[in-house]
Amino acid sequence: MVEQEPAAVLEFRACAFDEAPASVLVQAMREEMAEIYDGLEIDNAQMPKAGAAELGPPGGMFVVGFEHGIPVCCGGIKQLPDGACEIKRMFVVPDARGRGVARALLAELEERARGLGYRLARLDTGPRQTTAQRIYERAGYEPIGNFNDNPVATYFGEKRL
């Protein structure tokens, strides 16, 4: 296994979901999910909504992480009807993987969720994303039931913030 260098200091910025650089990262994530899950369209009607309306103010936010000025990761916060939030659309570009970027992104999203007043975060991931599930479990997420009717996800987690 090739050991990668640790991630540089990441700078996180709130960005509009549907504008570059966020939109470019989200499109890369859509393409990756379609590849991993045999043509899955993450924005189809059967999937939980997580677009610009859900991942923007007042109850949501979308964040992009920059390494040396280059966007390398993104993720969003979505308000849920019960007052909790859901972490959605987490993505790290392939060249930045394996260096702690996803862990840093998750920690940033949790901190931003606290800043928005949330005390409980939920998330999900699918059966072909075992690395994501390990990251979530190591960050303290406990398994819960299917809270968002995601037909693809097999892991649903919750954490007190």
Image (cartoon, grey):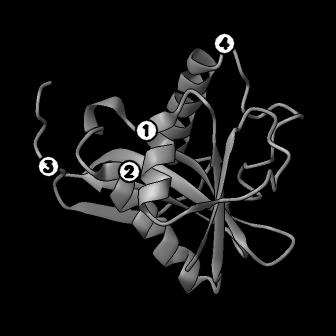
Question: Of the residues shown, which amino acid type is indicated by label 2?
Answer: Ala
Evaluate whether residue 67 shows in this view. Answer: yes
Q: Which amino acid, by three-letter code, is at mark 3? A: Pro
Which tag, 2 or 1, sits closer to the chain's start? Answer: 2
**Residue 114 against residue 143 in the figure, above or below:** below
Callout 2 secondary element: helix
Work out whether 118 lies above or below 23. Answer: below
Per the image, the residue denoted by label 2 is 102
How far is mark 4 from mark 3, CA to CA?
A: 32 Å
Tag 1 residue: 131
- Spatial separation of the CA atoms under disc 3 and disc 2: 12 Å
Mark nearer the N terminus (3 vs 2): 3
Disc 2, disc 1: CB below 8 Å? yes
Quarter-of-image position of residue 160: bottom right
Q: Residues within 10 Å of mark 4 (few under 14, many from 20)?
A: few
Dot 4 or dot 1, earlier in sequence: 4
Residue 59, horizontal then vertical, whole percent: 72, 74
Query: What residue does disc 4 label?
Result: 38
Classify mark 1: residues with Cα within 10 Å, few (<14), some (14-19) or many (20+).
few
Q: Which mark is residue 116?
A: none
Q: Nearer the viewer, mark 2 or mark 1?
A: 1
Pick whichever, 113 or 15, lies toward us. Answer: 113
Which residue is denoted by mark 3 in the rendering?
A: 6
- Mark 3 or 1 closer to N-term? 3
